């Protein structure tokens, strides 16, 4: 083999092949979304945050809700006819509060039915968006999370708790932080209440808003379907099968050895192994 041919093969494997595979995955994702739209007669929007890998260096990139996400989703909602339902599929650890709030408001203002579908998890800002929908559909093992504000690396509620327990005089910088924490919690509580007030009675909406924003749990506390129903939040657990298929088209990058192994086995309607 000539050196030029070997160089071409090397160039193809390093640069072109990963790009071709990514385009192929995107095409399959769009096809799956189109099939889901036909099945549910709705506009389907997917916001799926998986760990991505740069094709050249193999460096993982962690995804979360960004302003770019809110711009794209707001555009998709704006292009959706008023009488067409919207299904928003979410898989996210959360992200920028402003972006999540913009998406939530746009979803709430859409005139036709809105549904948020959560196959695995939607924490923090993802939960905020879910609360704005007319219907929440979750896998029976999926989770949401609290929406208490975070100021930098600290929960706003914890800043206030430390302030209330500390008897000595605090410096001006700390007092400013306490003031911001108080405002952040109040603002988020009011925001969540406005999302819920049209779905629940006033007292229930206020109670839920306070519970979800007051810092009762850690920010990563999993709110399961059972816990959400105990709180009085209505949850549908009938996730369309094609949503799982779509999620499979966002594979996590693997190292040299996978950490999970299993053999998919088809089962008949009676629950017995077909083999």
Image: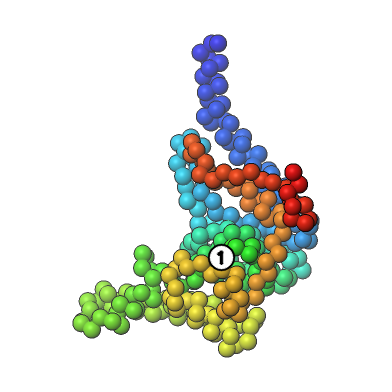
> Taking the image as drawn, is residue 120 in sight?
yes
Residue at the disc numbered 1: 143
Nearer to me, 114 or 271: 271
In screen coordinates, is 123 left or right of 111?
Answer: left
Residue 165 point in image, percent of width and height:
28, 82
Secondary structure of the residue carrying numbered label 1: strand
Outermost left residue: 168
Residue 169 point in image, percent of width and height:
21, 82
Residue positioned 58% across, 83% down in the render = 205
In screen coordinates, is 253 left or right of 274?
Answer: left
In screen coordinates, is 81 left or right of 1?
Answer: right
Image height of 57 relative to 186, above or below: above
Residue positioned 66% across, 54% down in the render = 244
Residue positioned 63% across, 64% down in the render = 140
Q: Quadrant of residue 81?
A: bottom right
Nearer to me, 64 or 137: 137
Image height of 200 relative to 129, above or below: below
Q: Quadrant of the C terminus?
A: top right
Nearer to me, 200 or 95: 200
């Amino acid at each position: 083999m000539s050196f030029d041919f070997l160089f071409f093969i090397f160039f193809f494997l390093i640069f072109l092949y990963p790009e071709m595979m990514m385009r192929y995955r995107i095409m399959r994702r769009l096809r799956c979304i189109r099939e889901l739209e036909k099945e549910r007669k709705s506009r389907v929007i997917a916001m799926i945050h998986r760990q991505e890998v740069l094709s050249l260096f193999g460096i993982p990139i962690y995804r979360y809700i960004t302003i770019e996400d809110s711009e794209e989703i707001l555009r998709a909602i704006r292009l959706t006819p008023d009488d067409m339902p919207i299904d928003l599929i979410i898989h996210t650890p959360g992200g920028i509060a402003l972006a999540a709030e913009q998406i939530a408001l746009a979803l709430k203002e859409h005139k036709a039915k809105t549904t948020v579908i959560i196959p695995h998890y939607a924490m923090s800002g993802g939960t905020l968006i879910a609360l704005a929908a007319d219907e929440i559909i979750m896998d029976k093992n999926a989770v949401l999370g609290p929406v208490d504000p975070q100021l930098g690396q600290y929960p706003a509620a914890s800043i206030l708790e430390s302030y209330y327990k500390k008897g000595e005089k605090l410096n001006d910088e700390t007092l400013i932080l306490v003031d911001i924490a108080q405002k952040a919690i109040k603002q988020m509580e009011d925001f969540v209440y406005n999302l819920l007030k049209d779905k629940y009675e006033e007292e229930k909406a206020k109670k839920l808003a306070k519970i979800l924003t007051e810092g009762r749990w850690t920010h990563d506390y999993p709110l399961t379907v059972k816990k959400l129903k105990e709180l009085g939040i209505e949850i549908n657990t009938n996730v369309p099968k094609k949503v799982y298929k779509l999620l499979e088209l966002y594979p996590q990058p693997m190292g040299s050895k996978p950490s999970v192994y299993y053999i998919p086995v088809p089962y008949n309607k009676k629950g017995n192994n077909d083999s």
